[in-house]
Each structure stands twice: as C-alpha cells, then as structure tokens.
Amino acid sequence: DVKVTQSSRYLVKRTGEKVFLECVQDMDHENMFWYRQDPGLGLRLIYFSYDVKMKEKGDIPEGYSVSREKKERFSLILESASTNQTSMYLCASSPSLVTGYTFGSGTRLTVV
Amino acid sequence: GQQLNQSPQSMFIQEGEDVSMNCTSSSIFNTWLWYKQDPGEGPVLLIALYKAGELTSNGRLTAQFGITRKDSFLNISASIPSDVGIYFCAGHSNTGNQFYFGTGTSLTVIP
C-alpha cells in the first residue's frame, strides 16, 4: 500500500523552539508539498519541492524553511516556533505537478 | 494565492438524503479535483476532472467540471454515516505550479 508517512501525529512545542516535521513517501514521486490547514482557511501551501535539493515558496512561507536531501524525504522546519504556527500540517507527494496529490495523515502541532 | 470558494461551508443532513456542494474560482482551471478528509486524517482523492463539461462518477459520488472552467460540483447520493467528513475541491491552471484548495465543506450525516 503506497503511502506518505508523517513522523508525528501530535506535537507540543514551546515558543521559540526549533521544530522539525518529517515526511517520507514510498512512491518515488518527484514532487512533495507542505500545507497547513486551519479552520475556515482550507489548505494553504507553505513550500514545495520538485526535485532533490530544489524548493519553491508557496503562499505562506514566512517563518518556515524546508529541506529535501533525499527524494523520499521532505522536512519542514519552524526556525523559531510561535503560537500562530499552531495548526495541522499536511505533507503530500505527486508524480507530476498536474496530477492529484497523496497526503499523509497530518501532524497537529501546538505551540505553547 | 488563488481563491476558491466552496459552498456550503457546512451541511447537516439525514441519512439517505442526497448532497450537493460546489466550488467556484475567479480563474480558469484545467483540472479539478475533489478530496475527502476523515476526522484526524489527511485528505484522500475522490474524483479528478480534466475537461470542461466532464461528468465523472465514483460509486455514489458524481462530480462535474463546469462549462465555464471556473467551477465544479460534487453530488453524493443516498448519504450514509461514513460520508461524514470535510470535502475539499482543488483546481490547477496551466500557468501555475500547484493545486489551489477550497475552504472545505463539512458534512454531518445524522443516522
């Protein structure tokens, strides 16, 4: 069963901490994405990557960075967590930029 | 980013009823997708549409790619309790690198 795996389902971090969210896909997909989901706002793209070591900013990249050292792994980094980054974070992958994405189960991050 | 408006925002229906929801955009899209998100899970792709006017079914679900290419519709017939969740539309244009997602329609089915 092909899948996108996010390492944590729930995380609680303190303000100012550096936070790493990890995502691994086993489908050999070229493209990987990080979204955040907030009530009433839908899914908003933070960053995406179309190849190893390549990254593109999405609509809300401020306060985040990403790393893609290997094709199967895409990490989202919160350099200094803030309470307004409390959210559900969804990772996704796809074989091309025009085909549907496969999503992970999400990481619900709470910053206190 | 692009704005996709979904309506209604939420629905409460009796089991067995049919459901209709729609998604509109200010831009023309070449691909429309419909996803369902179960509570506590990530979205799962239900239906993909690639041509204006296209009508595609997946079991009790039917989706249509609007003729104007600025809207899409999802219908669920004879709803059952496991239809509960949030339904998202997503659209992609030739000029962009990403799918843009709607704000979601939350569906509650009352047994």
Image: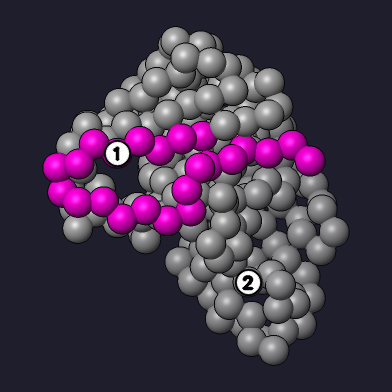
Q: Is residue B102 visible?
A: no
Asked if residue A15 lies in the magenta stretch, the reply is yes
Q: Residue at x 72, y 46 (%)?
A: B47
The kind of residue on which mark 2 rests is Val
Name the quadrant containing residue A59: top left
Residue placed most toward the observer, B41 or A57: B41
Q: Is residue A60 above or below residue A83?
A: above
Q: Of helix, strand and loop, which one carries label 1? A: strand
Q: Mark 2 highlights which residue?
A: B84
Asked if residue A61 lies left or right of residue A80, the reply is: right
Q: Is residue A69 magenta?
A: no
Q: Is residue B61 visible?
A: yes
Q: Which residue is mark 1?
A: A19
Mark 1 vs mark 2, CA separation in Å: 32 Å
What is the chain identity of the residue bearing mark 2?
B
Percent position of residue A73, x then y: 53, 25
| Residue at the image position 38 percent from the left and 32 percent from the top | A76
Q: Are marks 1 and 2 in contact (CB under 8 Å)?
A: no
- Tell me if residue A98 comes above or below residue B87 in the rendering: above
Residue visible at 64% across and 80% down in the picture: B109
Closer-to-camera residue (A17/A61): A17
Q: Position of residue B8 (x, y in %)?
A: 49, 67
Residue at the spot x=29%, y=39% of the render?
A19
Residue range in magenta is A1-23
In the orientation shown, which residue stands out farthest toward the right? B59
Query: Circle 2 — which element?
Result: loop
